[in-house]
Image: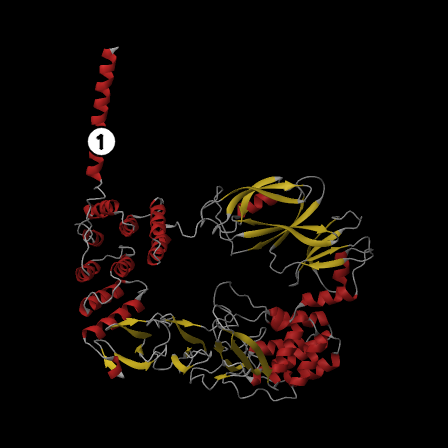
Amino acid sequence: MKHRQSTRGVKLCFAAILFLLYTFSLAADIPNQDHVLLASPTAASYLATVVDVLARKSRDDYGLPSIIDAEFSLRYSDPLLPTYRDLRAAYLAINKASIPYFEHQARWEQWLLLNWIEENTINLDAFSQFATDDEVIRVTTRDFDTDGQNEWILEIPDSQVVVLRREGTAYRLVETPLPFFRPDAHYVSIASGFMEEILFEDLTGDGLPEWVLAVGGYGANGLNGGHLLVLHWKNGRLVDIAPQGDGREQMRYDAPGGAAGPLFPNGVTISFTNEDGNGTQEVIIQQRQGDNWGCTWLLRRVFAWDGHAYSLQSRERFDNEVAGCEIRAAETALWSGDYDAAIVHYERAFTMPFAGEEVSIVPTESVLLPYAKTRLALAYTLTGQGESAASVIAEVAGVTDYPPVLTQFIWAIADNLGSALATCRAAYNSFAFECSPGTDTCVGSPLDVIVGTTLESFGEAPNSRHLSFPSPLQAGCDMGLMLRDQLAADPLRLDTSAPEQLAVIGFSIQESWNFDLNGDQHDEWLIKFELPIPALFLHTVSGGATYHDVFLSTSVDQIYVRNSPIGDEQVFVTTARNPGLNCPSARPGEDGSHWGPPHVATVWRLDSDSLRAAQHIPFCAPNELAAWLGTFEQHLPDAFVSWYEVPGLEYLAQAVYQWDDQQQRYVVTNIQPIRGKATNYALEPGETLWDALEQMREGNDQHALSIVEQGLRGQKVDKNTRTAMLYLRGLSLELLNRDAEAFAQYDEIYAAAPESAWGVLAALHLS
């Protein structure tokens, strides 16, 4: 018994020794947290190393300039620590190495400016301008907080406006929302008028002045629009109290001033007045605008102070009495099928002056007016006024110097005046050009004017490449509207097949299907036309004597009739391309077919005598869609695997679709995300670095570390990207005061390649 106890004691002692040896070996691998001392280089030595590192940078050193930029700003929050020369040398090196551009260039320029002022002991009260190594800085004195002490506005040419204040004996930056005018943008200089002060005066009645700036379009920059900043002093910062976000409620201005001169006052006027007598001033923006039809108007918007910010109070538009506004109204009516209203507006247009002088860009009168007369002849024809149509078309048919497409359009109407459908089809064909999607084959207008759409003046000239070729439905004629009107006036009867009746009135059929969906012993019909008309679904309602019609979307690519998974009922399915679907990858399918373009299949059903889309199912590969559809005689599968859009996920998830006969639709089960943004940061290697840097700059160091470590676990991280991410991991650990782990990470990078850019940077951290 004693012998066993003694043996047990020896074993325990030996185990304790082994444990101590193991612990010591771990300590040898990772330095003790309490005894690790990471190096803390001075700003000067860090910047000198940065210049050396970037000089030896290869194009494979992924993210190097951005990480250096982030590390310097995090380590040395006081920009006055380094000298101007050291800071400038590093700035030039980072700027040169940054591709495609230096993201935080504005901040470095501000630091350089502060350093120059500090080292040269410049008294801003004594200068209206001063020169640095690179530019001349203009100085304007202001008192934003009315404390009797000046703040200073400094303009860096071709770059930005900076506001400084005194803090003790030093100048400090004032936080503002002022823009940075990147040199590679299409505007050039603040001095030429891209940004200009409009007002420095108290607008809100609190005794503090507001600083109102017009950004964009003030001078001859070729910009026909911009917005107002209304800056207000609050807690040592300048904040924008103008309406925020996108949309019509912003203090934006867009007017056709053209590139030859400023918008103020040649297109936009801005005024400040207390219209409602409440002691605060409203901001009033008036714009003279126009469109491609020659319509001109005055847009007046009033923004009022609500105690916290300015917001849109009223928006009024005053059209001028010109032909262009009537032509616009006529076109809008014609597109909607209101031919009688279109005729009234066209007839009135030809009795009025063409356009006012408020805008410098107007459509070509010699082309637009003949086009409008031809459209009037079309409207006459569609309402059975053949003589009036012939009279109007005769006025333009004999002219020989029109653009070819206009001449073709005129004769399309002239040659088919006896038949409304034939005239409409000929008008459509005049503009039915074959254009390759996604190319510039049919960009612009062949008429020297823009037709088929309304383009209000938002700073784009009529020859803008953003404009597509005119739609034949709107520039020519919409036969679908004609058929709608025909069916509304004279519904199809049940005693003759629907395709036969449609063919008699001139609407030729490409393909048709008949089936009884609602069990009333009368067939429903699904019809595709040879003409550019949406597919037509015809059905009876509660045993009625005529068909009721429903037009499907023009985006439908294909139509299929299939047997439902269970029973003898039939369903029909439409498919349409949807490039917006974010399929998880672009890899070949098992049968060799490639993914994309994505399609959405819509299953339709009759519900209480109305047609509705029962379900939309995304498919990422053609072979998936074909396998699900099968053939006409087959039943749709009662279960299959496809894709499903999950809120919050970037990519579609895989899911099982199971048919529910009671609901007459598929129920989605077993959703399996393949990959995607299940969190608020990216896991793709190409995105990890930037997301982590952003989190670091916002002070979220643990979040940044999580992003990097998840990215490092990815299988697609190449060697160069991986090294950048390892360095970022070390920096994250250091910022979290996990010095031992940070030391080990930097040491690993240095040991792997001490002479590389990353190795030299890592050595800075090792004591």
Q: Is residue 667 left or right of residue 166?
A: right
Placement of 1 over or under 379, stated as above or below: above
Placement of 586 over or under 376, stated as above or below: above
Q: Is residue 767 left or right of residue 262?
A: left
> Is any part of residue 43 visible from this angle?
yes
Q: Give the residue displayed 48% in from the left and 65% down from the top.
A: 439
Report the quarter where the N terminus lies: top left
On the image, the x and y values in percent for residue 284 come to: 51, 81
Q: Give the residue displayed 38% in from the left and 79% down from the top.
A: 195
On the image, the x and y values in percent for residue 101 come to: 32, 65
Q: Secondary structure at mark 1?
A: helix
On the image, the x and y values in percent for residue 487 come to: 76, 64
Q: What's the coloring here? A: secondary structure
Q: Amino acid at mark 1?
A: Tyr
**472 vs 608, nearest the viewer:** 608
Most extreme residue toward the top is 1
On the image, the x and y values in percent for residue 125 come to: 26, 82
Based on the displayed image, in which of its 4 quarters is residue 475 positioned? bottom right
Based on the displayed image, in which of its 4 quarters is residue 505 positioned? bottom right
> Is any part of residue 160 visible from this angle?
no
**2 vs 633, nearest the viewer:** 2
Counting labels gives 1
Question: How busy is the neighbourhood of tag 1: few (under 14 within 10 Å), some, or many (20 plus)?
Answer: few
Q: Give the residue displayed 32% in from the left and 74% down from the top.
A: 162
Q: Which residue is mark 1?
A: 22
**230 vs 468, nearest the viewer:** 230
